[in-house]
């Protein structure tokens, strides 16, 4: 099965969190798709807080990241760390990022306009808006759109650099997989819990009146009753949720429990897979939660939802520029949607992937079979839907989800999933080591702590 590293980005810039893994781009993996919501703040006069190889990092840069991080933590219902500590983390993240961007420039890693346009389209699509509306919202929130694109370009450059520098360092053996499975079978650590939750959020505005609160609570109660009665939860989320992941059925995706709000973990502690938890109240509003999947970290589920995907791959080269490949695939997408062309026939004739002879069909894929960025695109598509062209290090892809099904994994498939989880863990470790090496080679001077 082809493993595709897409450049679809799932977080709006500029948010920096602690580096975790190459596969989902550390700055992007923790953040859920979000449009900017920054409010104007009174800032002190700007000054330099640090130098990275003589390149300055300013106080206002740190404050911008700090504000976004605080908004993200608040929105997810997490515990807010001390502001000075959070500011230090943001500065550390900026230093790491600046050193890596300098390495990217020295290494000739670049991102052209078509690739950047696709990244913008991906953010817009995952927020349920078009590019024009995304731009309007960015500007309405006081963010310069040109700066937004520049920040996004940096993130795509970093993703390309990390793919090139870190992935070749990782090798997985059968002994690694065997040891991983033994460790998981012997594990009794409850902190290893992984959850995939979906929610319907009924947002409560600040300073809501008692009457408004009662109305919104009643709305959440009705959603909870419909969910308990067996209605399709994804459809409920798309219909009723105010959450930013409503377009993907309200799902957060499988993640470790420590990457979910503690009140969500507590509320679902005794809820079985497929069950509906009691209504939860957070700072954002009322949440109706469903447990989609629950397992010990790294232990593959026996029952999984498989997705059948097909794609067309064009590889840019001397005869075909990347922008021309994007335009060609976008045209084919329109023709297929208008029923003026057949996806499989186009794939057989033009795709430059080994799946071409199968009409681009990649077959049934288990969770974790593709890199997370690719799965996030696939998970956001309903059967029959196509994503806009996606640029990866393999070329430019047109991706379509064909169907989904529940399946029981064979022993071999469970080992394959375990291998992917081992690979993800090793990539985490390799990325952290690489990031330390890059920073260690840089000259870093801390001038003074950021003003808050």
Image (spheres, rainbow, N blue to C red):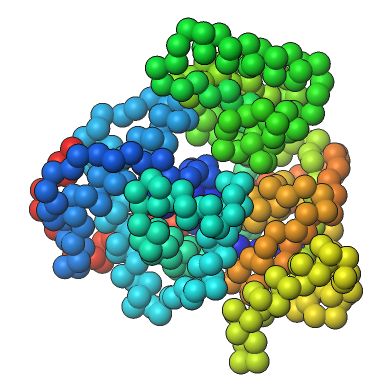
What residue is shown at x 78% (from left), y 54% (from top)?
385
Which image quarter is the C terminus in?
A: top left
Q: Please name the residue shown 27% across and 56% down the image.
A: 95
Judge left or right: residue 316 versus residue 78: right
Note whether 185 is above or below 22 in the view shown: above
Residue 169 as seen in the image, left or right of residue 58: right
The x, y position of residue 108, in whole percent, is: 40, 80
**Image quadrant in which you'd find residue 325:** bottom right
Q: Is residue 198 above or below residue 393?
A: above
- How many dots with numbers? 0
Asked if residue 114 shows in the view, the reply is yes
In this picture, residue 22 sits left or right of residue 344: left
Image location (x, y in percent) of residue 155: 43, 60
Residue 371, given in percent of the width and then of the height, sits at 63, 55
Q: Which of the 4 quarters of the picture holds residue 96?
A: bottom left
Q: Residue at x 34, y 78 (%)?
A: 106
Give the camera-side residue of 248 and 210. 210
Q: Quadrant of the N terminus?
A: bottom right
Residue most extreme to the bottom: 318
Q: Is residue 144 left or right of residue 201?
A: left
Name which quarter of the figure residue 161 lies in: bottom left
Residue 292 visible at all? no
**Residue 85 picture location, percent across and down:** 24, 35
Q: Nearer the viewer, residue 50 or 141?
A: 141
């Amino acid at each position: 099965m082809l493993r595709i590293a897409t450049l679809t980005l799932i977080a709006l810039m500029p948010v920096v969190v602690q580096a975790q893994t190459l596969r989902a781009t550390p700055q992007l993996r923790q953040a859920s798709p979000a449009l900017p919501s920054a409010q104007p703040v009174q800032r002190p006069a700007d000054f330099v807080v640090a130098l990275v190889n003589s390149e300055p990092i300013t106080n206002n840069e740190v404050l911008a990241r700090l504000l976004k991080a605080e908004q993200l933590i608040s929105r997810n219902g997490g515990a807010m760390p001390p502001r000075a500590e959070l500011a230090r983390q943001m500065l550390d993240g900026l230093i790491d990022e600046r050193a890596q961007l300098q390495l990217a420039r020295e290494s000739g890693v670049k991102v052209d306009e078509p690739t950047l346009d696709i990244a913008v389209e991906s953010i817009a699509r995952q927020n349920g808006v078009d590019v024009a509306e995304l731009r309007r919202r960015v500007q309405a929130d006081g963010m310069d759109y040109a700066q937004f694109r520049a920040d996004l370009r940096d993130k795509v450059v970093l993703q390309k650099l990390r793919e090139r520098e870190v992935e070749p360092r990782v090798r997985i053996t059968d002994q690694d997989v065997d040891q991983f499975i033994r460790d998981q079978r012997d594990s009794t650590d409850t902190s290893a819990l992984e959850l995939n939750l979906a929610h319907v959020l009924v947002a409560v505005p600040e300073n809501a009146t008692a009457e408004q609160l009662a109305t919104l609570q009643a709305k959440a109660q009705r959603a909870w009753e419909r969910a308990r009665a067996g209605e399709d939860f994804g459809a409920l989320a798309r219909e009723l949720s105010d959450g930013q992941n409503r377009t993907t059925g309200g799902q957060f995706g499988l993640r470790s429990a420590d990457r979910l709000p503690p009140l969500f973990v507590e509320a679902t502690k005794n809820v079985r897979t497929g069950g509906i938890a009691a209504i939860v109240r957070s700072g954002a509003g009322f949440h109706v939660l469903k447990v989609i999947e629950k397992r010990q970290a790294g232990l593959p589920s026996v029952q999984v939802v498989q997705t059948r995907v097909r794609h067309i791959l064009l590889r840019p080269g001397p005869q075909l520029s990347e922008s021309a490949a994007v335009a060609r695939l976008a045209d084919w997408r329109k023709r297929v949607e208008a029923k003026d062309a057949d996806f499989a026939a186009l794939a057989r004739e033009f795709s430059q992937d080994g799946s071409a002879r199968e009409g681009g069909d990649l077959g049934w894929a288990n969770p974790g079979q593709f890199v997370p960025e690719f799965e996030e695109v696939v998970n956001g598509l309903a059967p029959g839907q196509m994503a806009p062209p996606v640029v990866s290090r393999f070329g430019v892809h047109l991706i379509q989800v064909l169907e989904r099904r529940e399946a029981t994994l064979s022993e071999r498939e469970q080992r394959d999933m375990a291998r992917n989880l081992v690979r993800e863990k090793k990539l985490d470790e390799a990325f952290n080591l690489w990031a330390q090496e890059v920073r260690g080679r840089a000259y870093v001077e801390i001038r003074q702590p950021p003003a808050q």
